[in-house]
Amino acid sequence: MWTLRRTKDEEGIALVTVLLVTMVLLILVAGTMTYALGSLPISRRDQDWNGGLAAAEAGLDDYLFRLNQNDQYYLYNAGNPDPANSAFTTWVPVPNSGATGTTCPTATPSNIPCFRYSVDTTNLTSQGLIVVTATGRVRNVTRTIQATFRRHAFIDYLYFTDYETTDPAAYPTGSNSNNSAWAQANCAKHYYEGRNATCTDINFLSIDTINGPLHSNDAILICGSPTFTGNVTTSWQGSAGKMWRGNSGCSNSPSFKPGYPKYADPLTMPPNNVAIKADADASLGGAGCLFTGPTSITLNSNGTMDVVSPFTKWPATPNNCQPGTGVALPTNGVIYVQNVPSVATDPNYTSGCITSTQLNGSATVQHPLGYPQQYDATSYGCRNGDVFLQGTLKGRLSIAADNNIEIVANVTYQGGTGGSDLLGLVANNYVEIYHAVGNSSTPSSAREGSLVNSYYNLKIPSTGYTAAFHNPTVQAALLSVVHSFRAQNYNLGANTNMGSITINGAIAQKYRGLVSVSGTSGYGKNYNYDQRMKYQSPPHFLNPVAAAWQVVTWIEQKATYAWNAP
């Protein structure tokens, strides 16, 4: 009896235990279901939140595609909408999202991802920038992105070169087979287009450190172990899996720190800088300053400039661009220095040359500014549109020349490279570091350094300088349309104490220019990319021919439209 009673008691306890466990499990399931159902709105909003951002990005992509298909698409806006695109004035579905129709409902929230955008072209003319504000919507959630568009530009790179070879104009002019005429016919082509093997191609050497992005339309030639700290691209497809050429006479081990070079489409140089001239010439509607013949420009840290331009006529010169001291920078930030016109009917025409006293001397020379200085072997054209530049810029300015831009002393920003000042220098021919040299007959009082190739470095004539142009500094974007950035007389004079050229900005050139003969003469290189040029540009700076538009800045901001906006 006792055994039977004990078994029945245990059965009762087991039943109670099962019921309790079942109840606990039911409570857990109910709690889980309640939590899951309660989380649905949160999860739904998270999905819509992410979907709204993706829809806004789709709007930017839509406008970018249309702009690259039609380079006049920037003319469309809310006041002048594209008849085939409603996104300027209302919501449109994201393409390929499964939505039907061309508009999105606004009466009730919809799971159709939609976008709309507005366009601001205020800075298109001056800086080449278009600002697009795109808003994306999913159900009752909207998110807005503002992006800045700019054409793929020369100033995207610290170093851009069309041809990795010596400028044909730098070849001898004699009658031997490798003269400048021969070089123009055989060397003015890319390596992959069949450039003659005897052309003088330029190497990147072990002493070279490129502190910024680099692109070449040509095949890069390496000798030794140069260092590239920025992204490197080339328009050469490469050979045997290698995107650079090694010089057969060197031990080649370059360091590409961000990663191996990649292919990128070429950027085409414009034939000249005449587009900038139109922005300076009042007779063509330009609001800048047009000067004529050799012109000296000294930039002042108070936002003015001193201009000496003897061939420039006044008061016929419009836009308040009278040469003199304390001249205001032009309103559109553009200066162009033209050759003296050769046609007598041109209002800027002057016959002959203007003579002046030679710099650092007493002789009379056939040049309005006194160049070349005493004992200098360099030659200058007395009617050429040359700029002789120095000083400290406060503001934004582009200076372009029919011929050369000669940097005769340091050119810097009043606010440094972290401020708002920005300078562009665009020469049809050369952008040059002034490097005057004299020969063995030069008296010791006018020279310095050791004799190299029978030439000495000369003291420079600029006020405040008593020695040769040591360690020149240039803060600017430099562009040589037809030739190169280089040092004058790079192969002459002594290298003793000349130091390095410091560039803070960007360099773009048709051919690789030279600044030294290693161990013999000239300057070292200290080139650094001005990171602001990724998203800013000097006024009216030249762009490549038919370059694609790209997004250069991207930021989310407070939503511009509510979900039910019409």
Image (cartoon, rainbow, N blue to C red):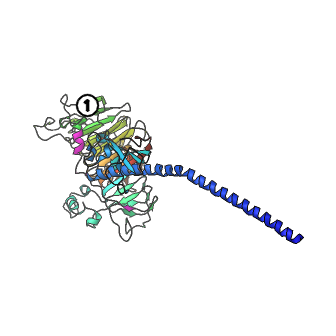
Magenta span of residues: 259-279
Say which amino acid is labelled 1: Pro
Left or right, 16 with reference to 202: right
In terms of secondary structure, where does tag 1 sit? loop
Which quarter of the rendering shows the C terminus? top left
Please tell me whether residue 22 is drawn above or below residue 456 in the rendered image.
below
| Res 549 visible | no
Residue 399: x, y in percent? 29, 40
**Prevailing secondary structure class for the magenta stretch in the rendered image:** loop
Residue 469: x, y in percent? 37, 43
Residue 19: x, y in percent? 72, 61
Residue 264 in magenta? Answer: yes
Foreground of the two, 120 or 293: 120
Left or right, 261 with reference to 510: right
Residue 65 in magenta? Answer: no
Residue 373: x, y in percent? 28, 40
Please tell me whether residue 291 is drawn above or below residue 7 in the rendered image.
above
Q: Which residue is mark 1?
A: 323
